Amino acid sequence: MYVKPRQGHYGICKKKVNWVLDLDIRPFFDTVEHDWLIRMVQHRVRDKRLVKLLSRWIKVGVVDDDVKRQPAQRGLPQGAVISPLLSNIYLHYVFDLWTHQWRNRKAKGEVIIVRYADDAVLGFQYERDAKDYLALLNRRFSTFGLAIHPEKTQLLRFGRYAAQHGAQHKTGKPLTFDFLGFTHYCTTKRNGEFKLGRETIRKRRVQHIKAVQDGLRKRMHDPVALTLKWVRAVLIGHMNYYSVPGNRESVSVFRHEVEKRWFKMLRRRSQRHTITWETFGSRVEHLLPKVRIVHPYPECDFAPNTRSRSRMR
């Protein structure tokens, strides 16, 4: 159940979701049980040579101070190209298939599941379903050596009626949750219809700005044309991920902060600088990519589209 994040956005807006479970697994890559993982691989792979090769890759271990390799008993090698694939195989059997069965057999209301690697968000129609699921999931994870982080995992009222419930019970605005670099919050459209808002996590944006500042400092004495090319690549890469509907303001802030730090770096190249912010801004305005929404609305991806003269209508 390796689901696209946009499906979660669409499900929260269109399905009967009143509660959201923001699930966080304790250091996942350090707690994977090797025996279970090998059995899961053997379930689909019949070639014993390939299974043996994967087993060696899984149990590669670490090298200590005496340059002696210590075989690992659990966990996956950090940074290995095969680790994301193996982690998805593990969670497919431990989490995806079991959660799908629970939803079909035990859930009283609607349930949506969104998982990306070891990050997962679930939406429930009823609070009782969410609490029952979380209790059973703890038992399920303990069998396979995993554990839910008790402090980072949260169950919060969220969805179309969260703001109305908060106003009636005087509990304040609906809470927010972070998922895949975005802070998700409840808001409304101009017509008053519910809307799931997304903006860049503030902490993540600050980290990116500091990384850009360090990169500019290293390129202080490089030719301006080369630095311009690098800055353009940074902004395009940032927008390709974070330019989702409703997040234009946060992306604009990031672009403005990058411009400010590049301007300061240029002025520090020499004590006889003559460049001003007005001159700099007018020059880079048409050189740097403008902020625009790159990703479409999730409704455009999943809403049925048919031609007016379709025979199926």
Image (cartoon, grey):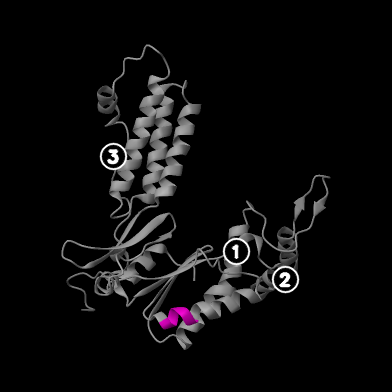
Q: Position of residue 32 (x, y in %)?
A: 66, 65
**Are the residues tagged 2 and 3 within 8 Å (C-beta)?**
no
Q: Nearer the viewer, residue 135 or 280?
A: 135
Name which residue lies at 25% across and 27% down. Answer: 282
Q: Position of residue 134 (x, y in %)?
A: 50, 77
Residue on which the image places disc 2 = 35
- Which residues are drawn in magenta? 128-132
Q: Position of residue 94 (x, y in %)?
A: 59, 74
Is 280 drawn above or below residue 99 in the view shown? above
Q: Secondary structure at mark 3?
A: loop
Residue 225 visible here: yes
Name which residue lies at 38% across and 40% down. Answer: 235
How many labels were placed on the picture?
A: 3
Pointer 2 local density, CA inside 10 Å: few below 14, some 14–19, many at least 20: few
Residue on which the image places disc 1 = 87
Q: Secondary structure at mark 2?
A: helix
